[in-house]
Image (cartoon, grey):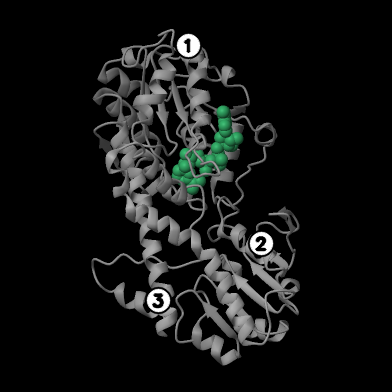
Amino acid sequence: MNLENPKNILKLNEEEIKKYISSEDIRVTVVGIGRIGLPTALSFAHAGFPTIGVDINKNLIQMINSGNFPLKDEPEFDKIFDSVTKSKKFEATTEISQAVPKSNFIILSLPTPMDKNNVPDYSALISVGKSLNKLLLSGSIVVVESTIEPGFVENELIPLIEGDDHRLKAGQDFTAASCPETANPGEILRDFKRIPRLVGGFDDRTTTIVSEIYRHVFGVEIIKMPDCKTANAAKLTANVFRDVNIAFVNELSILFENLGIDIMKVLEACDKKYNFETHYPGAGVGGPCLPVNSYQILNSARGMENNGMLRIIRAARETNESMPYHVVELLSDALNESGKSVRGSTIALLGLSYKPNVKDIQLSPAEAIIGRLEQLHANLRIFDPYFKGIEVFSHKIETDLINTITNADAAVIITAHKEFCNIEPSLFVTKMKSPIVVDSRGIIELKAAKKAGLILKGIGRGGI
Ligand SMILES: NC(=O)c1ccc[n+]([C@@H]2O[C@H](COP(=O)([O-])OP(=O)(O)OC[C@H]3O[C@@H](n4cnc5c(N)ncnc54)[C@H](O)[C@@H]3O)[C@@H](O)[C@H]2O)c1
């Protein structure tokens, strides 16, 4: 890759920018090439732009540079990876100083997790922001794809890049934009091709330039936002909407269990109404996005007089975080009804990932379920097709589904992986010591369960 002398984008007029984009000579660096950053970097390289991926994870960089694509559960990206590494449009390094000074379009796809007190942690963005002050070329654009609180780019990141020494001035020497990523793990390529992109810039000119570049790379609708903070607010609003609605359905589920009503039948009927949006109950809401995003919104109101107004979001978090314990209660009830107790029983746990068909345990409700069952002295056997034979949450994961359920006193379905959706209820009945199953994802059909003689409990599945 010849990465010398990238142009000063900010000095180009509108016509020159268009030509520059179609010449595919914009030099891109993506900092943070994990779940979102790597597919993003590959997309820019695939669109023709020489792209460098930067990550502090040495093993990851080593894997990438030896030609192994790390995201096995992201269909089609392995082919793009092979193509752009062969054509040398994409390379990866652990050294940000080897990448940023050769680039004029910097994308930040850094993690924005939270600490154990649920306070959002922007330390990766802060540390990279500081190094950009030293490394950024004049005339560069910095795009933040990470999910952040409204105002973070304006109030924290830009001042860090400008630095106490004022080496750089936003709007003159560099500019910044927010383009919050909304792709779904396991379906990233599909989402990159269909979900409109939100772009909010430091100023209108930045929004226009970044929009043109993203349109060129992804070919999707671009929604221009008034500024960075409105783009970030839109991303958070869409995700918090889901967290809150899932909590609503979880609350109703617990009520319906007591009223002998099956929530699935209720949702099926509601779904027919044009303005109802169906959300499903479950063992909890995990992953790097939804739970964190609710806390980001709550955190953005810190110190404000109307902080207490965000009652719905706070309550939704409480409900969703209580669901793993509800799953254990259902299990305990089912065992008690069969004259057994959790203590000393062998429980088969099916699924660790926070969502189906991906290898990802970030903030997965499985962790709380395992912790609670350990407290209650259950013997655990855990199976997840994505974690066979490795240690997760201090347990060696089983390598085979049948062995996991054989002679178990009960099974709990935590994740609706496709491998679990096709299990015949009769398999549980023939293999297990007692045919007790807690289905936290509503994947087992009630009639089939009854016919097979399964003792089934499920979230919101009253009337079983
Ligand atoms: N995963 C998702 O479902 C998803 C979807 C949309 C948006 N997002 C957002 O995208 C952002 C990235 O999420 P992700 O899931 O890709 O995270 P990830 O953990 O998979 O990837 C982040 C990468 O950044 C690297 N990193 C950490 N600190 C670094 C530093 N100082 N310098 C260079 N690299 C560093 C890590 O090693 C890791 O490889 C987050 O803000 C997240 O909220 C995630």
Earlier residue among tags 3 and 2: 3
Earlier residue among tags 2 and 1: 1
Answer yes or no: do the residues labelled 3 and 1 have beta carbons within 8 Å? no
**Is there any visible trace of residue 130 in the rendered image?**
yes
Residue 390 rendering spot, x and y as whole percentages: 74, 54
**Is there any visible trace of residue 424 in the rendered image?**
no
Q: Nearer the viewer, residue 392 or 66?
A: 392
Q: Amino acid at mark 3?
A: Leu
Q: Is residue 4 above or below residue 390?
A: above
Please state which of the two labelled residues, at mark 2 or mark 1, is closer to the viewer. 2
Which residue is found at the position 59% from the left and 30% from the top? 55
Mark 2 falls on what kind of element? loop
Residue 307 rendering spot, x and y as whole percentages: 32, 43
Q: Is residue 354 above or below residue 252?
A: above
The residue under label 2 is 385
Return the mark for residue 255: 3
Q: Is residue 303 above or below residue 94?
A: below
Determine the image quadrant of residue 83. top right
Q: CA distance from mark 2 to mark 1?
A: 48 Å
Quadrant of the image containing the N terminus: top right
Which residue is found at the position 44% from the left and 47% from the top? 183
Answer yes or no: do the residues labelled 2 and 1 have beta carbons within 8 Å? no
Q: Amino acid at mark 1?
A: Asn
Mark 3 falls on what kind of element? helix
Q: Amino acid at mark 2?
A: Pro
Residue 256 rendering spot, x and y as whole percentages: 40, 79
Assess disc 2: are there few (<14), some (14-19) or many (≥20) residues with their C-alpha within 10 Å of its C-alpha. many
The residue under label 1 is 5
Q: Is residue 443 left or right of residue 339?
A: left
Assess disc 3: are there few (<14), some (14-19) or many (≥20) residues with their C-alpha within 10 Å of its C-alpha. some
Mark 1 falls on what kind of element? loop
